[in-house]
Image (cartoon, rainbow, N blue to C red):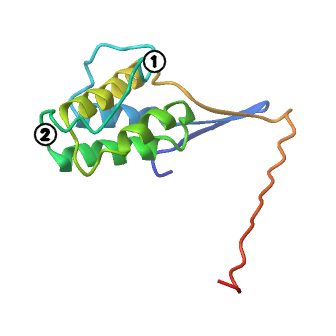
Amino acid sequence: FLGLQIKQMKQCTFVYQTKYTKDLLRRFKMADCKPISTPMGSTAVLDPDEDGEVVDQKEYRSMIGSLLYLTASRPDIQFAICLCARFQASPRASHRQAVKRIMRYLQHTLEFGIWYSTSSSICLSGYSNADFGGC
């Protein structure tokens, strides 16, 4: 459903997006890329890079949007993608390289997803501090 694959078993429910990930890698010509074990380098610092080579803004936004959709089942890439998403207004080659590194990580972790165990007691709590009537 909407790119999500759900596998229900007696002891768990597994939510993943392997097919969507493969399609994403194919769309951005990264299907045959060399896999890598981390989405970002430990010393990676992304800045506006005003002097860097300007890249196609439409393609960069498309890459970021596709990756953001993938975070529904892949919280491990959330931080790295959001860091790259900051530079959608003026993407540079260094930013595109960071996005491509995330895609190389996805190539390495195609089968990752979220595992919901039936034996765990999940308690969802929500809090709000809004006064919509007074605003």
The crowd level at tag 1 (other Cα within 10 Å; few <14, some 14-19, many 20+) is: some
86 shown above or below 95: below
120 shown above or below 34: below
Mark 2 — residue? Answer: 54
Mark 1 — residue? Answer: 38
The crowd level at tag 2 (other Cα within 10 Å; few <14, some 14-19, many 20+) is: some
Residue drawn at (36%, 38%), measured in percent from left and top? 84
Residue 18: give x, y in percent of width and height.
Answer: 45, 32
Residue 105: give x, y in percent of width and height.
Answer: 40, 21
- Mark carried by residue 129: none
Residue most extreme to the bottom = 133
Distance between mark 2 and mark 1 Cα atoms: 26 Å
Q: Which of 127 and 116 is in front in this view?
A: 127
Residue most extreme to the front = 51
Q: Which amino acid does label 1 sit on?
A: Thr
Q: In which quarter of the image is residue 19?
A: top left
Q: What residue type is labelled 2?
A: Val
